[in-house]
Amino acid sequence: MKSGEVQILTGLDAETIKFYESEKLICIKRDNDSNEIYDDETINQIKSIKLLFKLQIPISKIKDWSQGIINLESLLKEKLKEIDKHEVVISNKKEAYKGIIKELKKNGKTDVDVFLEIVEIFQSEEYLDFNNELKDILQPSLTIQILNTLILSGPLFWLWINLSGHKYEFIVENIIISLICTVLLTLCWKSYFQKKKNNKNENIGCLLSFLGLIGALFLTIWSFIFISQLQEKIFVPDEYLLYMFKPPYSYMIFFFEIELIIFIIYIINKINKSSEWKWAVSIFNIFKKKVLIIVVANIFLIYACVTGITVVTKNRIVDYSFYKPSGVIYSYNDIVKVETGFKGKFLGRFRKNAGEFYYIVNFTNGSKVNLYQGNSSLEDTYLELEIIDDLIMKTSAEKIASPENSEYCDLDQRYIDRFLRIVSNR
């Protein structure tokens, strides 16, 4: 492409283009006869430099960009911060003008020293930096947004757990709360993106963060399923009545979720840097320095989760734990007491878990376990509890049972009737 055509395409004269070349902003190729050769890439670079000059970017910064020392996005962000500082200074000057005019109208004179001190404070670097930090603080926080998402995702997560485990206690309330949380989640993210709509880079970061969060939740669910299946394969015999992933071991799953979130945030920060993620990056860097400790800790967590199970068959009850992986074996004759009934109101006033059934088995060594809400292969829900109760009542075990508070139970009447039969069985 000839020089004249380039001038028409770029809107620049030959002298300006030569100036760009002399300042090493562009590199123009030449043929054997020293004629200038302009390709599309060079023309685009000339136009970009023209744009940067019009945006009042210093030539030193343009040189850094053309030499690949700084990318265009970072360059424009620096200029934007500089403009923000100037806007603050101009705004403060306007306020100073108004203040001086007001004083002149009121007293016919003004205290120069006071206003001079105020203007010097407003123009100081410390004040400008503080003002920028304050603006950042007032911006919608992605960290808080993700925290809100985690909280609002709780009912959705437990709805999935209850449905997959065929646990239909309070299922109607669970569905209603899940729908409300879904609406609130949608509104929260809509509001967040609207406030961030002018910052494409941050929106990409938000999208990555949201997808990462969903990924972390799915991986947590997968971990829960994987550990349950592993427990079933290792500890649960073919003919079982009930087994349960008992607390507090079942809560350890959430340590894996925290680790996953930190790892995902670290990866996202690599792709799209954000000052909000410094805490997670710092934690991940500590993890990297203590790899052996973290690996050992995770192996122990998996081991503790897998062994945190109680299995009930027609002949015995086996209580496994991380400190007793072979399990403590109890016969039904080792049961000294059974406590069963319905929970009452919290502090006699608040319903909370009022009406929830419980079936606590006490052994001769002082150990106890609540067999309610275990996993069973029987299709008829809670039938396993009735079978277990019949087996226990054939022994000399004491039974403390009461139908009190059954009116608060929200399950289908056939399940309430089953619980009442268990309570009255002696």
Image (spheres, rainbow, N blue to C red):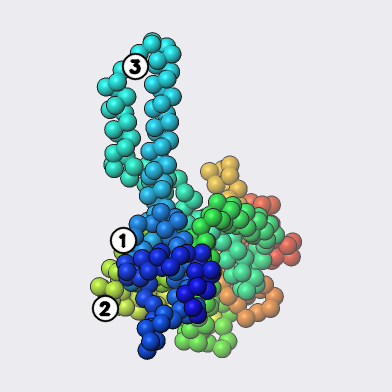
Q: Looking at the picture, which amino acid does disc 3 mark?
A: Thr
Question: Circle 3 — which element?
Answer: loop
Q: Disc 2 versus disc 1: distance between alpha carbons?
A: 47 Å
Q: Are marks 1 and 3 in contact (CB under 8 Å)?
A: no
Foreground pick, 217 / 223? 217
Residue depicted at x 29% and y 20%:
112
The residue that disc 1 covers is 60
Q: Residue farthest to the right?
A: 413
Count of numbered labels shown in the rendering: 3
Q: Is residue 41 visible?
A: no
Could you tell which of marks 1 and 3 lies nearer the N-terminus? 1
Instruction: Categorize mark 2 by other alpha carbons within 10 Å: few (<14), some (14-19), many (20+).
Output: few
The image shows residue 214 at horizontal and vertical percentages of: 54, 69
Q: Nearer the viewer, residue 4 or 308?
A: 4
Q: Which percent across, then down, holds residue 22? A: 32, 69
Q: CA distance from mark 1 to mark 3?
A: 43 Å
The quadrant in which residue 120 appears is: top left
Decide which of tag 2 and tag 1 comes sooner along the chain.
1
212 shown above or below 100: below
Q: Amino acid at mark 1?
A: Ser
Labels 2 and 3: the sequence-earlier one: 3
Badge 2 element: helix
The residue type indicated by label 2 comes to: Leu
Q: Which residue is mark 2?
A: 292
- Location of residue 50 in the rendering, given as x and y in whole percent from the top left corner: 45, 62
Query: For the residues carrying marks 2 and 1, which lies nearer the camera in this image?
Result: 1
Task: Kindly state the secondary structure of the residue where label 1 is placed.
Answer: helix
Which residue is disc 3 drawn over? 110
